[in-house]
Amino acid sequence: MSKRPVLLFAAWVAAAALTAGPAAAQSPTDNPVPGAPPGACADHSRPTSGFTRRAARRAGHRHILRGNARDRGCGVDRVTISVARKLGRRCRVLSPKRRLGHRTSCARRHWLPVRGTTRWSFRLPKRLPNGTYVIRTRAVDFAGNVQRPRRHRIRLG
């Protein structure tokens, strides 16, 4: 048997590996696709998310809250938000159906998805009553690290 077919086969395999692109040779530090299982990337730092006072003022008039999120390691997978109307020591939490629930502890949260990841937006319902709202943001990166919720207060009305 000749060595020539073996060398041609080895050259063909090497060429296929080079032209396959980054998907075929993905290292543990590359960003995986959105929705990848936690741990798809090696990262030990928590992501951050939030919004500015200016964005909070605009949300009071336009009912659209905009913010940003970032992560030093693998990248931001998703951002969630919790909205609660503060009434004395109790809160009314915004449900996934976009309605305020009954008065309950302010520690209770319903995490709602936002649109976008590193630059995100959340449309507040038009029917929210005027008042003070506590909004918490939370980001999750591709490695599964979860941000400690960051609390902000905004005034609607």
Image (tube, rainbow, N blue to C red):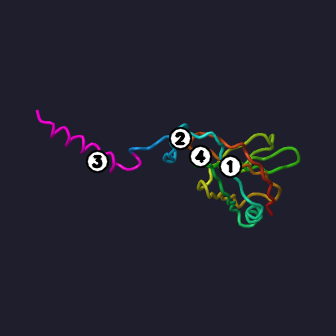
Q: Which residue is mark 2?
A: 41
Closer to us: mark 3 or mark 4? 3
Of labels 1 and 4, earlier in sequence is 1
Q: Residues within 10 Å of mark 1 (few under 14, many from 20)?
A: many
Q: Which residue is mark 1?
A: 48
Return the x and y of residue 155 as percentages of the image width and height: 81, 59
Q: Are marks 1 and 4 in contact (CB under 8 Å)?
A: no
Q: Residue furthest right?
A: 88
Q: Residues within 10 Å of mark 2 (few under 14, many from 20)?
A: many
Of labels 1 and 3, earlier in sequence is 3
Q: Which residue is mark 3?
A: 15
Q: Which residue is mark 4?
A: 73
Return the x and y of residue 107 as percentages of the image width and height: 78, 40
Of labels 3 and 4, earlier in sequence is 3
Of labels 1 and 2, earlier in sequence is 2
Of labels 2 and 3, earlier in sequence is 3
Q: Are marks 4 and 2 in contact (CB under 8 Å)?
A: yes
Q: Amino acid at mark 1?
A: Thr
| CA distance for labels 4 and 2 | 9 Å
